[in-house]
């Protein structure tokens, strides 16, 4: 049985179909790349999995349980975290504050324990701080720990986005174009980190335009066009698929 | 590494001395009017702190006076009509508004935002109408005449609420202190961080697994409880509660006290805001021309919003005063939020 | 069944709430903020109308327009010099606009008390007489309210659907960023829309003035009721504002007939129940 499964998922906006009968099976440990022209429904797919949108039809199953129709926070609590396409941040917070408030799910102690600063809470808090700093170190944000998040460069803001998502302790990580707007070096750094995250046992689904990144990284690639899944398979196979080439006609992908 | 930064310590010490002087005010004067000004300011400060706490979750409540009214009427009804003594009624004056906040919050905070502001605003009006029309219980516009708590004797020392205003003053100080400490602790703990995150970016916060509703309702309910206590104290210290004492305009005043005082701090800002604005209001009420109070009040608030740097209230002026006038620092960098 | 008179009163109230709620939602859809002082523009409109009719002796349809233009102009000034300046592009912006427009309630009511005095004023001499329809009669003043509201709604419909300005308003309401990319000056549009919204409130206040009394505090109730109408209809939906206004006006009148004292309380509970069933209001965009 697959880990994360989409069964005939459709999402309509009015009469406009953003996703049409998508079936997708993701196994534990996969790195799935999602490609497609603009407006093909890639972000909608992530929005449906993460609970931001409710699918109009179909179900999303995670670990054998239905998650479609649940709120984003409930889905995040099950272990699915995501990043956003634009640089979505907490206004006014520093890098470390952003990641700390995002670590909500790492706490097992309850609110009243936090209020009274019980021993158990303090111990847990210390452990969380340690993990957050480690995360910042891994994503090369350690030197900017106390920098206001708005002050980071575009590339580092995206890195912070990944750190924020990782702070939710996910088992599945959804990345919406993690390398856009980055130079080659930064992209490669992100790729390296996605691999590291994957090696920690996290299943990764990422939207990516850069085929080189996917060739390097993805175990499987899913191609969307006009909301339909038009191809799925190993990166090399998909790139040579005639339908995929047609869909991309006129763009620089191949 | 810990070191003592005199630039931080000195302003705090001065502020501490000022607070201490207010606390020992009855040593200098037992003038009823002076003490009453501070008692009322303190009561409004508690309500304004409640507003600020709710604001920390990104919601504007325009109905906090309704919770004061519910608290005030609860303890008034239980002492006058049912014959309970003050202290259990006072306790109930926190519980009842808390439950009402919990129920209304659970429904309205699902959408939040402007809907929440409108509903809380309407709540103020609805509570006023109920108080006015439910004559058999609230005596309508005539209001309920409340009685002070019975004298407490501790080791032969008698605290008599009938004989002087001082016991009310200290009850107020105690209530303000407890509210301030509780809210301050909420603000600096992990809960404060969670509040901040759902205000700063609800969508992102929700995707990090934070249940928005739960924390919005917590803030609204906690604020409701303390505001209810304040309302009870208000009704008993003024010896009367009428429908028009705690309506829409008072709700709005609570909000303005919080904003003008400074929303960056959960306790200090609302306290300064309510003392300054309440005193300002008292001086204004001595002016004989009708309408000028409202005109000046509204005008001053608009001017404050237009000409003070954004995000600052009176409490930030205190900070600026030290930096600019005392330390003569050249650059002023606005603080990032303290969460 | 309540008597016909109650239904007519309900219709009159509906007309007020519709016009008020429509103006507020129009402003909201462009500026993204509620003008909490909307009721005070209603009140100021009534006063301008009163003095135009009584002191200057201007015929009442012209006075109605004068009231709309003057108060609409005041609305533009408020937008230009206050709202635009305090509405900073951050999470706090909406808060400052809320506080500023609420402070304006105090300011305008205070100013009106000082300038116009506190005593109730009446305008019963405008359009006196009643239309006798056999079993019941309706005053010409009330008929004027209904006709006026119909004219306003039809005008607004034509403006929004068949003029360039209307198209620009609708485009900016749906996609502010895209609209500004297509050469629509959202800032100027905001001024215009605020002007229209306030003018609508002022004219509603004017046309209601002969039916009711005028004093500096008449704006409060229509404002709260139209806010509730907006909640029922769904924030941001113009259709919702109209339907919400209609529902609330009739309900208020009919419930008040059966339960003279607690009608507002019943309405409030009803609004809460609607929110419980449909958190986004009847016509609001439902959750994605």
Image (cartoon, coloured by chain):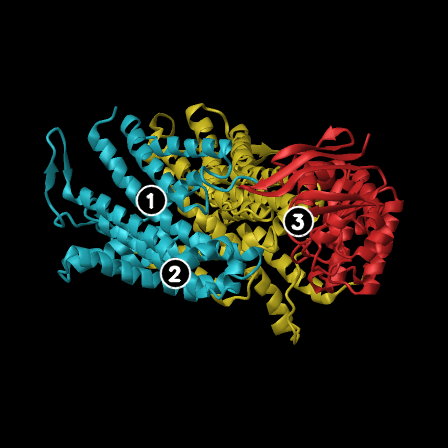
Gap between marks 2 and 3, in whole Å? 33 Å
Of mark 2 and mark 1, the one earlier in the sequence is 1
Would you place residue C188 above or below residue A19 in this image? below
At 53% from the left and 62% from the top, the residue drawn is: C88
Secondary element at tag 2: helix
In the rendered image, which residue does mark 2 sit on?
Answer: C164
Do the residues marked 3 and 1 share a common chain? no
Front label number (2 vs 3): 3
Chain for mark 1?
Answer: C
Q: Quadrant of the C terminus of chain C?
A: top right
Look at mark 1 in the image and give the residue it sits on: C18
Count of marks, rendered view: 3
Q: Position of residue A254 (x, y in %)?
A: 78, 58
Q: Position of residue B321 (x, y in %)?
A: 60, 69
Helix, strand or loop at label 1? It is helix
Per the image, label 3 sits on a secondary structure element best described as loop
Give the colour in which the image draws chain C. cyan
Q: Quadrant of residue A211?
A: bottom right
The colour with which the image depicts chain A is red
Within 10 Å of disc 2 (Cα), the crowding (few <14, some 14-19, many 20+) is few
Q: Nearer the viewer, residue B25 or C143?
A: C143
Q: Nearer the viewer, residue A101 or B35?
A: A101
Other residues around mark 1 within 10 Å, as few (<14) / some (14–19) / many (≥20):
many
Q: Which residue is mark 3?
A: A40
Q: Is residue B53 at least partly visible in the picture?
A: yes
- Is residue B242 among the parts visible in the rendering? no
| Left or right for A195, reference C240 | right
Chain in yellow in the render:
B
Neighbour tally class for label 3: few under 14, some 14-19, many 20 plus, Cα within 10 Å: many
Q: Position of residue A113 (x, y in %)?
A: 74, 37
Residue at screen point 39% across, 60% down: C165
Quadrant location of the N terminus of chain C in the rendered image: top left
């Amino acid at each position: 049985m697959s880990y994360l499964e989409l069964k005939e998922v459709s999402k309509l906006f009015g009469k406009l179909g953003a996703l049409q009968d998508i079936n997708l099976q993701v196994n534990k440990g996969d790195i799935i790349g999602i490609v497609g022209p603009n407006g093909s429904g890639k972000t909608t797919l992530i929005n449906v999995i993460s609970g931001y949108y409710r699918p109009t039809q179909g179900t999303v199953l995670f670990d054998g349980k239905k998650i479609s129709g649940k709120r984003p926070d409930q889905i995040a609590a099950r272990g699915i975290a995501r990043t956003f396409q634009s640089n979505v941040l907490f206004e006014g917070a520093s890098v470390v504050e952003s990641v700390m408030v995002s670590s909500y799910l790492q706490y097992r102690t309850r609110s009243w324990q936090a209020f009274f600063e019980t021993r158990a809470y303090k111990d847990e808090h210390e452990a969380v701080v340690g993990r957050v700093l480690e995360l910042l170190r891994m994503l090369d944000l350690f030197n900017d720990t106390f920098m206001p998040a708005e002050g980071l460069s575009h590339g580092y803001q995206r890195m912070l986005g990944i750190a924020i998502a990782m702070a939710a302790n996910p088992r599945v990580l959804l990345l919406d174009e993690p390398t856009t707007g980055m130079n080659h070096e930064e992209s490669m750094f992100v790729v390296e980190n996605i691999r590291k995250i994957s090696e920690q046992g996290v299943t990764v689904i990422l939207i990516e335009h850069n085929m080189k990144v996917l060739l390097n990284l993805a175990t499987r690639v899913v191609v969307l066009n006009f909301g339909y899944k038009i191809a799925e398979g190993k990166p090399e196979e998909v790139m040579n698929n005639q339908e995929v080439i047609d869909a991309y006609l006129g763009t620089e992908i191949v | 590494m810990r070191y003592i930064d005199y630039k931080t310590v000195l302003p705090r010490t001065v502020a501490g001395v000022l607070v201490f002087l207010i606390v020992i005010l009855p040593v200098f004067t037992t003038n009823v009017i002076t003490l009453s000004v501070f008692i009322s300011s303190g009561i409004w400060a508690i309500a304004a702190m409640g507003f600020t706490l709710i604001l920390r979750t990104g919601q504007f409540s325009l109905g906090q006076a309704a919770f004061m009214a519910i608290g005030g009427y609860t303890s008034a009804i239980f002492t006058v009509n049912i014959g309970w003594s003050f202290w259990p009624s006072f306790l109930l004056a926190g519980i009842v508004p808390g439950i009402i906040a919990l129920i209304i919050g659970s429904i309205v905070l699902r959408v939040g935002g402007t809907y929440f502001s409108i509903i809380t605003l309407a709540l103020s009006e609805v509570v006023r109408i109920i108080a006015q029309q439910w004559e058999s219980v609230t005596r309508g516009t005539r209001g309920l005449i409340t009685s002070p708590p019975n004298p407490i004797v501790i080791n032969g020392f008698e605290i008599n609420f009938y004989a002087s205003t001082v016991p009310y003053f200290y009850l107020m100080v105690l209530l303000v202190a407890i509210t301030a400490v509780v809210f301050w602790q909420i603000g600096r703990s992990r809960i404060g961080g969670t509040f901040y995150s759902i205000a700063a970016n609800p969508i992102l916060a929700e995707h990090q697994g934070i249940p928005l509703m739960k924390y919005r309702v917590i803030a609204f309910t906690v604020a409701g409880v303390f505001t209810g206590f304040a309302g009870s104290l208000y009704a008993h210290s003024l010896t009367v509660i009428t429908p028009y004492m705690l309506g829409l305009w008072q709700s709005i005043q609570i909000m303005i006290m919080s904003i003008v005082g400074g929303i960056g701090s959960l306790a200090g800002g609302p306290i300064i805001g309510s003392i300054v604005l309440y005193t300002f209001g008292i001086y204004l009420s001595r002016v004989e021309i009708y309408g000028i109070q409202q005109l000046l009040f509204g005008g001053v608030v608009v001017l404050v919003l237009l000409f003070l740097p954004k995000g600052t209230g009176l409490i930030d002026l205190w900070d600026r005063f030290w930096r600019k006038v005392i330390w003569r620092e050249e650059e002023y960098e606005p603080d990032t939020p303290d969460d | 069944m309540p008597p016909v008179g109650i239904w007519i009163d309900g219709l009159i109230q509906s007309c007020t709430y519709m016009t008020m709620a429509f103006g507020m939602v129009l402003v909201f859809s462009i500026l993204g903020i509620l003008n909490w002082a909307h009721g005070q523009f209603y009140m100021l409109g009534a006063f301008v109308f009163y003095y135009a009719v009584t002191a200057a002796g201007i015929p009442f349809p012209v006075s109605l327009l004068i009231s709309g233009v003057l108060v609409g102009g005041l609305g533009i000034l408020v937008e230009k010099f206050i709202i635009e300046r305090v509405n900073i592009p951050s999470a706090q912006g909406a808060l400052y606009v809320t506080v500023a427009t609420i402070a304006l309630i105090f300011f305008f009511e205070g100013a009106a008390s000082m300038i116009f005095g506190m005593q109730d004023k009446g305008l019963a001499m405008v359009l006196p007489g009643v239309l006798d329809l056999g079993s019941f009669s309706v005053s010409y003043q009330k008929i004027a309210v209904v006709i006026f509201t119909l004219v306003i709604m039809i005008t607004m419909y034509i403006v929004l659907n068949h003029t360039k300005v209307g198209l620009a308003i609708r485009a900016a309401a749906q996609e502010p960023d895209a609209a500004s990319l297509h050469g629509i000056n959202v800032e100027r549009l905001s001024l215009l829309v605020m002007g229209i919204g306030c003018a609508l409130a002022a004219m509603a206040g004017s046309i209601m003035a002969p039916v009711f009394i005028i004093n500096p505090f008449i704006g409060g109730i229509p404002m709260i009721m139209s806010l509730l109408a907006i909640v029922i209809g769904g924030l941001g939906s113009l259709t919702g504002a109209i339907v919400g206004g209609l529902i609330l006006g009739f309900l208020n009148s009919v419930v008040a007939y059966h339960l003279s004292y607690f009608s507002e309380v019943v309405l409030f509970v009803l609004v809460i129940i609607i929110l419980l069933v449909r958190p986004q209001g009847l016509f609001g965009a439902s959750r994605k």
